[in-house]
Image (spheres, rainbow, N blue to C red):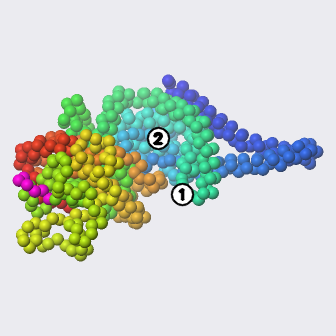
Amino acid sequence: MSSEAGVRTARSRALAVLRLRGRALAVALLPAAVAVILLVGVPTGHFTGTGWDIARWTLTPLAALVLLTAAGVALVVARARPAMSPTVAIAEEAAPDLYRMVRDLADRLAVPVPSAIALTPDCDSWLEDRTHPAHGRPPPAEEHGDIADAGRHPHRRAVAAPVLVIGSPFLWWMRVGELRAVLAPVVAGTGPSAHPDIAAARRFVRGLDAAVAVTSEHRRGPVFRTVFAGLGWIARVLLRSCRVHAAEMERGVAAAAAERAQAVDYGLRIVAQEQVGLAYAGWDRLLTRVALPAWRMGRWPSRLNAGVVAALTELSRRDRLAEGFASRLGERPACDLLEEPGTVDEATSLLAARLFHGGPAGSGPDWSPVHWGDYPEEVVDRKWRTDAARLHRVLDTLGVRPGVGAESPGPDGPTLSRVLDHLTHPGPDPDLDPHPDPDPGPGSRAERPPSASPPADGGRGADGEREAAPAPAPVSGADPDDEDLVGEDLVGTTPRSAALAARISAEVAREGAAATARAASTASAPTAPTAASAGLASPWDDRALPLLPLQPPRTGRELLADHITAMVCCAAMDTLGATPGLDWLDGPTLLVGGVRVTDLPAQVMMLIEDGDPTALRLWLARQGIRPEKPVRLV
């Protein structure tokens, strides 16, 4: 499809959308027009008689009701704020070279220049219309002699130009030439977007979409909900009627833009498209494997875009198919087009944390940035010790005594042997109380006075024997024998593994609910101003964060495996001198003698599914890890 053919197709579809708008207006005005004719017929002597009187008194209120409804729909469509992508605005003073490159690209394509540039923490780029009054006025663009803007006022043209949204990973991974080739078809879309019919059709569709969103809110009284339900139904009918035409219009615009961009860096764009797929894979891996564990610990990596370069460089080192990609790193990266890449990286990293995980807009006691050099100590080590502490708290609620026996001498402090012994022996255990009393009476082992504290001698009584640690209150509603808690993901595991996983899941859910309540209570509190939060002052709706959760909630099997792995890693660090590490592709990792451990998950899964610790104990013995030694928890 040629550029002119694409524009013609888009314009014909835009006219179809506008015709639907005109028909809707005609339907709203038709009863009023008939009522006016009937009323005018009285003084002129026409339409007299009982039948015409009944028609007048029936149709006049109906026409008034239809007009009020149409006015309400028009008011909601006009005032509703269209959806706006969360982005970090980039002023021209912060990236003059980037603005110059986009302006030169628009000149080569003979299209209007985008009014502004913004970054998004995603591997995509697009044009976004932000001409709605609620979005604010974009900065004026320079004069551009394009035929689409001939005869228009410069200020009006600048306001109508869309904003160019660029995926931040592209700036750090791509070279300058590759970025220009990737942005060519995007910038070319400003040409069709300047057509008045296409722009009007887009405004109408966006207004209907915003009206549907506004009328779907449930924060009003019953009267307003009833009125908005009717208005929303009309908006949905109109939106469904023009959905096909709007989709075809956008396809025509995209086809026209792609055809116009064929003459600009066509050969380089083929190579750059390969980098788009690679950047997407590296960005997804970095978010799910590296950033997500930090976000769950209340820390947000402040250099995510620099991290994706490290991740993709590591991928090229491991995968010989990607060797050619590393040779590009000697060329000028696109992030050099920014005056302060570090500040922009921090702002987009905070935005990514808010979009994909949720969190406040600035730093605070429970939400602070972390640099990659501090990640192993402040995130990995803390995560493992937190999970290990939670695992032992859950064992306490189950009434599991500290490890005893030939391989578990029962030292002071939590041990890995306690976990292995509990998950090893199938069948009933005399040391396990499957139904701990949630309200123990006087004399119960779990009873402790409110002001009591552990003995100063390390928890040993007067006779020198170690006293059992009091068990905390059990998780309410988390009976290990309750089949409702044993989901499909725990099928194929031992009964003890299933019970322990159910308890851990309940504990994690309770802690998550408490963290959410704390975040909600402090949402209105002022946060520490940072350079990152300064770039996030955008009028997008952040009341439903996270907007794009990365992963579904972890299953009970995954949680149990994570907690046992964390306990093994804590034992390795405290008894063997192993260190926490960061793998750019796999996230937190254990380093034994400077070598990354890769075969631990298989041993842990054998323990969970079969209740057989033999393979894991042999692995511990080969590494020199002593499971009977206590570990340090948080």
Q: Is mark 2 on a helix, strand or loop?
A: strand
Tell me the residue at 18%/53% (across/down). 429
Residue 593 drawn at (x, y percent): 8, 47
- Indicate whether 327 appears above or below 39: above
Q: Can you give x and y, in whole percent of width and height, for residue 139 in the image?
A: 49, 50
Between tags 2 and 1, which lies in front?
A: 1
Q: Do the residues labelled 2 and 1 touch (CB within 8 Å)?
A: no
Residue 324 sits in quarter: top left
Q: Earlier in the sequence, mark 2 or mark 1?
A: 2
Q: Name the residue under label 1.
A: 219
The residue located at (43%, 33%) in the rendering is 185
Residue 504: assigned label:
none
The 10 Å Cα crowd at callout 2, few under 14, some 14 to 19, many 20 or more, is: many
Query: Which image quadrant: the C terminus?
Result: bottom left
Left or right of 22 in this view: 464: left
Residue visible at 58% across and 48% down in the picture? 211
Q: In this view, does 309 lie to the left or right of 21?
A: left
305 relative to 544 in the view: left or right: left
In the image, residue 259 above or below residue 416:
above
Residue 127 - label = 2
| Residue type, mark 1 in image | Arg
Does residue 620 show up magenta in the picture? no
Element on which disc 1 rests: loop
Q: In which quarter of the image is residue 180?
A: top left
Q: Is residue 463 above or below residue 539?
A: below
**Could you say where residue 330 lies in the image, as x and y percent from the top left?**
23, 38
Q: Please, what is the three-letter code of the amino acid marked with disc 2?
A: Leu
Q: What stretch is highlighted in magenta?
A: 402-407
